[in-house]
């Protein structure tokens, strides 16, 4: 796809690690333009970085959207679940589409590999959680390949420096949201979710392990489905890869390890938990940007053609 002359106007609410990393990804996008980067502290590292880049700033937080006259078609909310439950009302009143990076569950879930098009018809979408983005699409692939699968156990290990206060405050929402998304998308009866934060000083790459009861007769089909899904997700999360683990527990237990290395834009590469949800949010926003800009020009014929995205100098075509 040729480079777009116009770009979708987007705002970012929340200037911490996730918000600042989102900003750098937006600035690299052929389809998105940041018109406001809003937080509370102009002296924070994120705000200072945005100022260096010449991005429009506000230290009024949500008031920048509720009281200001910002030209914005879409906003990324990178605050917290409790905050977003109030923010969503303001965005709706202002007619601004919202991509929620908290586990607030106001709008429908979005997993780009499964339902990227939900952004086209909904005014508020939820990006589940970092663990959800890493586990849900693979659980759905397993269920599609083996209908007898009824449950999944998901364990996610992340580094201490990749977890902020908002995640700690929202941990109950994290568990509930991730479990619900696993059951909803994959049609499972039960999903057990665990989040483990490694000890301070260690920097493990984000790792999510899924375990299923899969009959040996279905193993080949399941493994093929997992590898296919891996390629689909790598179109927008290039640092993701999977490993099929040997059966240590029982003959019919299949475990798959999902490892995510980030792009290293603002957060360190080992913090793939932050990078995967941001990459997913950008993928959804770019889908809407193409729709919106083509709608303005009356050229919808090629809407569902595969997008080509540039990530860190690597050109990747989406599935």
Image: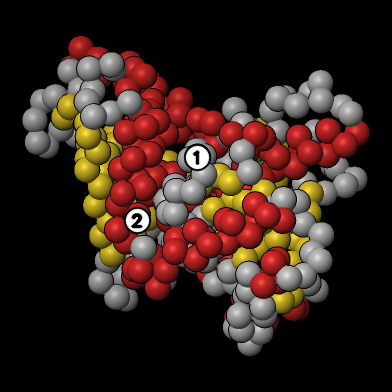
Towards the viewer: 143 or 198? 143
Secondary-structure class at tag 2: helix
Locate residue 201: give its quadrant.
Answer: bottom left
Task: Tell me: 39 left or right of 151.
Answer: right
**Tag count:** 2
Q: Position of residue 15 (x, y in %)?
A: 59, 72
Locate residue 305: give its quadrant.
Answer: top right
- From what the image shows, is residue 124 above or below residue 78? above
Seen at 74% across and 75% down, the residue is: 57
Q: Can residue 260 be seen in this snapshot?
A: no
- From what the image shows, is residue 3 above or below residue 141? below
**Residue lying farthest to the bottom in this orientation:** 43
Mark number, residue 173:
2
Towards the viewer: 78 or 195? 78
- Whole-number angstrom distance, CA of label 1 to CA of label 2: 15 Å
Q: Residues within 10 Å of mark 1 (few under 14, many from 20)?
A: some
Seen at 74% across and 67% down, the residue is: 36
Q: Residues within 10 Å of mark 2 (few under 14, many from 20)?
A: many
Q: Position of residue 315 (x, y in %)?
A: 69, 41
Seen at 85% across and 42% down, the residue is: 4
Task: Tell me: 183 left or right of 227.
Answer: left
Q: Position of residue 314 (x, y in %)?
A: 66, 45
Q: Which residue is mark 1?
A: 108
Seen at 50% across and 40% down, the residue is: 108
């Amino acid at each position: 796809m040729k480079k777009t002359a116009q770009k979708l106007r987007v705002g970012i609410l929340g200037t911490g690690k996730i918000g600042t990393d989102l900003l750098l990804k937006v600035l690299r996008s052929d389809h998105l333009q940041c018109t406001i980067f809003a937080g509370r502290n102009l002296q924070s590292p994120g705000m200072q970085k945005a100022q260096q880049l010449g991005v429009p700033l506000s230290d009024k937080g949500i008031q920048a959207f509720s009281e200001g006259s910002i030209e914005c078609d879409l906003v990324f909310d990178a605050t917290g679940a409790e905050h977003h439950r109030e923010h969503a009302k303001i965005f709706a009143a202002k007619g601004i589409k919202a991509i929620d990076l908290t586990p607030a569950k106001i709008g429908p879930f979005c997993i780009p590999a499964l339902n990227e098009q939900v952004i086209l018809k909904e005014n508020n979408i939820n990006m589940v959680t970092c663990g959800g983005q890493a586990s849900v699409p693979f659980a759905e692939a397993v269920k599609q390949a083996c209908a007898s699968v009824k449950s999944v156990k998901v364990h996610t290990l992340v580094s201490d420096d990749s977890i902020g206060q908002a995640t700690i405050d929202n941990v109950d929402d994290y568990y509930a949201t991730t479990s619900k998304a696993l059951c909803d998308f994959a049609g499972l009866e039960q999903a057990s979710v665990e989040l483990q934060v490694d000890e301070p000083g260690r920097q493990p790459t984000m790792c999510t392990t899924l375990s299923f009861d899969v009959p040996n007769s279905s193993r080949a089909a399941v493994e093929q489905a997992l590898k296919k899904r891996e390629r689909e997700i790598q179109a927008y999360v290039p640092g993701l890869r999977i490993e099929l683990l040997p059966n240590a527990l029982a003959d019919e237990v299949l475990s798959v390890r999902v490892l995510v290395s980030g792009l290293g834009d603002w957060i360190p590469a080992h913090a793939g938990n932050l990078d995967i949800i941001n990459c997913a949010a950008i993928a959804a926003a770019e889908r809407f940007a193409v729709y919106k800009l083509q709608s303005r020009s009356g050229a919808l014929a090629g809407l569902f053609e595969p997008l080509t995205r540039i990530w860190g100098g690597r050109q990747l075509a989406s599935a």
